[in-house]
Amino acid sequence: MRIVCVIMASGEGKRFGGNKLLASFRGAPLYRGILKATAPLFEASPRDRLVVTRHMEIAAWCWENGVRLLLHDLPERNQAIRLALAALNCPGSPLPDGCLFCPADQPLVTEESLRRMIKTFQEAPDRIVRLAYQGTAGSPVLFPAALFPELAALPPGTGGREVIRRHPELVTTVEAQFPEELKDIDTPEALRELEGELPETPQQTDAAALHFRMAKAPHEQDDLRFTVPSLRFTLAVRTAAILIREDRILLERTIGKNEYYLPGGHVQPLEKTDETLIRELREELHAEVEITGFAGVGELFFPWDGRSFQQLCFYYRVRFRTEIEAPGIPAEGRFDGFDPAETGRYHLEYVWVPLEELDKIHLIPEESMPLLLDQDAPPCRFVGVQTDSA
């Protein structure tokens, strides 16, 4: 069975503000990701893999590295598809049984997922095979030869999705190893977000192997996290402040939510946890604090944003260094603040809660309550499990 591959690398990147395919991703131009993933699959038949582009920089790299190339100046995607199919249907070669179309702006598609797509097609060569994750299908797509005429006759402004729309009964999906495989890059923000999502070598997807993640937030700080993409699991390290003044404890909550938390934040690489807490309170409260004691550590398990989290949270007792170094913070009641986060800026409300009223609020994690009520208790370890997203 002959299966050919077309790498679509002609996008203009209008939303990106320039040629996104040349943007740096993990130390190399963006388009190299899909070339790396497809290369082993067509090592024995390199002429069955074709890069279709209108960009001279990509063409030059292909020429220098012996990658088959179709350079064109046509404006429409349907025209590029027609040219590619004609180029791969070479006289003297057996007719292709299927064609794998891969966008060049999805740099985290893995060789393993592509192999499983090809295997699925080999078992059912009359099907359209799409990569998908948890019910959501996307690209790459492998089309059977019977649909080549429809692909070659696509009207302007359309692509392979039009043929898929006409034949939903033919679609078979192959599950991606992690959702980021299906993500394409349309904006600089999407590029920065995707760079922080997955390991440096996305071809290595052993679910048992944790990878280091430098999670970029809008305020350009780095959170220390370890993630198993295939399990949608993240291990994070956080610190929290037990700040009590006049029998009131300072808590925070997101506006519109009923859950209360101790203020604090995530640890950065090579940062001590007590230093994290001092930095976080300086950033969020514009206040200077000092550590008065270590209260304990919590092992917390909870869902967040479609992932399962395990968090190690280090609790410290703190106090303002002086009242002068806590400007703008009232002695009681509520006041507003903002917390930079990966998905935006959360509007926070800080609240001084009387200690005798703690049992009237929803504190997360509730297992930390003894640390708050007994200020003389020795440091301890506890486990907290939350089953619903906050």
Image (spheres, grey):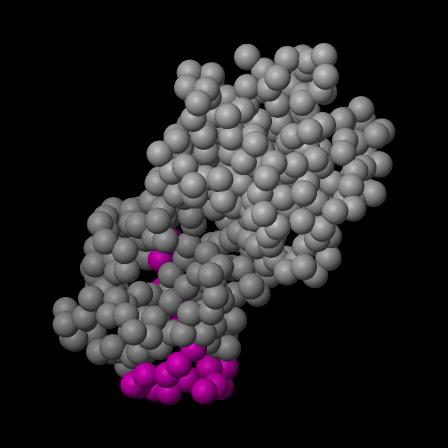
Residue ID at (47%, 69%): 345
Say left or right for 108 vs 354: right
Camera-nearest residue between 8 and 66: 8
Q: Position of residue 8 (x, y in %)?
A: 65, 39
- Visible in this render: residue 244? no
Query: What residue appears at the point 78 percent right and 46 percent down from the top-left corner?
Result: 73
Residue at 65% x, 19% y is: 42
Question: Residue 269, position in %: x, y?
Answer: 56, 49
Q: Which quadrant of the figure contains the N terminus?
A: top right
With 65 as the anchor, is 219 left or right in this view?
left
User: From what the image shows, is residue 225 above or below residue 333?
Assistant: above
191 relative position to 143: left or right: right
The quadrant the C terminus occupies is: bottom left
Q: Is residue 328 magenta?
A: yes
Write down the quadrant of residue 367 in the picture. Answer: bottom left
Image: magenta residue range: 313-337
Q: Residue at x 65, y 30 (%)?
A: 85
Q: State the residue in front, 328 or 198.
A: 198
Q: Position of residue 130 (x, y in %)?
A: 46, 34
